[in-house]
Amino acid sequence: MPVFTTPRPACPADYPAICRLVQSPRELFFVYPSGRWPFTVAQLEDLAQVRRDLTVLDLDGTVAAFANLYDLEPGRHAFIGNVVVAPGLRGRGLGRRLMEYMLSRVFVHHGLAEARLSVFSHNVPALLLYVDLGFVPYAAEVRRDHDYREVVLLHMRREAG
């Protein structure tokens, strides 16, 4: 039976494993649209300079999922970003567990009124999870994906409570 640990702060020793969670240019676009394939430790180190609450979820001692917070506005909101689950472990509830933890960071630890996130409309599994967690769209914008096709980036929010 797999053993999941409580989400914990990511440390630099986790960075290679976090990078390996992203398996293709398409996945990198979903997780970190401004990233360059292949996702490298150097890119993650740069990201860590502008993000906070970098968090991993372990499975049997191996990094299985990652997320963080950004654009935190005290008293108002923060964005949950760079959410990724190991490809072979998707659909098993790890994303939900990690998102619930990140929501607790936003609402309980930071005391904010709203959690926000952005998700591409063709990332259906993530979109379904976020809707199930109570997120609702509040804006949309057209972007170009890793193959330069037009896609829609949905901005979603959930209020505390």
Image: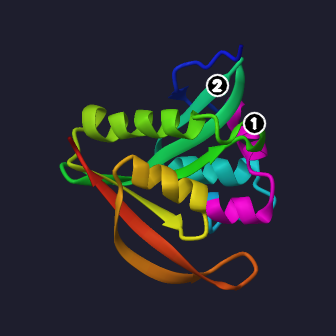
Residue type, numbered disc 1: Ala
Q: Quadrant of residue 137?
A: bottom left
Give the left or right position of residue 30, taking residue 153 as reference: right
Query: Foreground mark, 1 or 2?
Result: 2
Q: Identify the image quadrant of residue 87.
A: top right
Using the rendered view, name the quadrant where residue 138 is placed.
bottom left
Q: Is residue 94 visible?
A: yes
Is 23 one of the magenta-colored residues? yes
* Residue 157, position as x, y percentages in the image: 32, 58
Q: Which residue is mark 2?
A: 58
Q: Is residue 103 left or right of residue 142?
A: left
Please say whether residue 133 is one of the residues in the magenta stretch.
Answer: no
Q: Residue at position x 42%, y 36% from top? A: 100
Residue 149: % across, % down = 69, 85
Given residues 2 and 35, the one toward you in this image is 2
The quadrant of the picture occupied by the C terminus is top left
Q: Is residue 32 visible?
A: no
In this picture, which residue range is highlighted in magenta?
A: 13-30
Q: Which mark is residue 17?
A: 1
Give the residue drawn at x 20%, y 48%.
Answer: 113
Question: Closer to the camera, 115 or 89?
Answer: 89
Report whether 142 appears left or right of 36.
Answer: left
x and y percentages locating residue 74 in the rendered image: 23, 49
Badge 2 element: strand
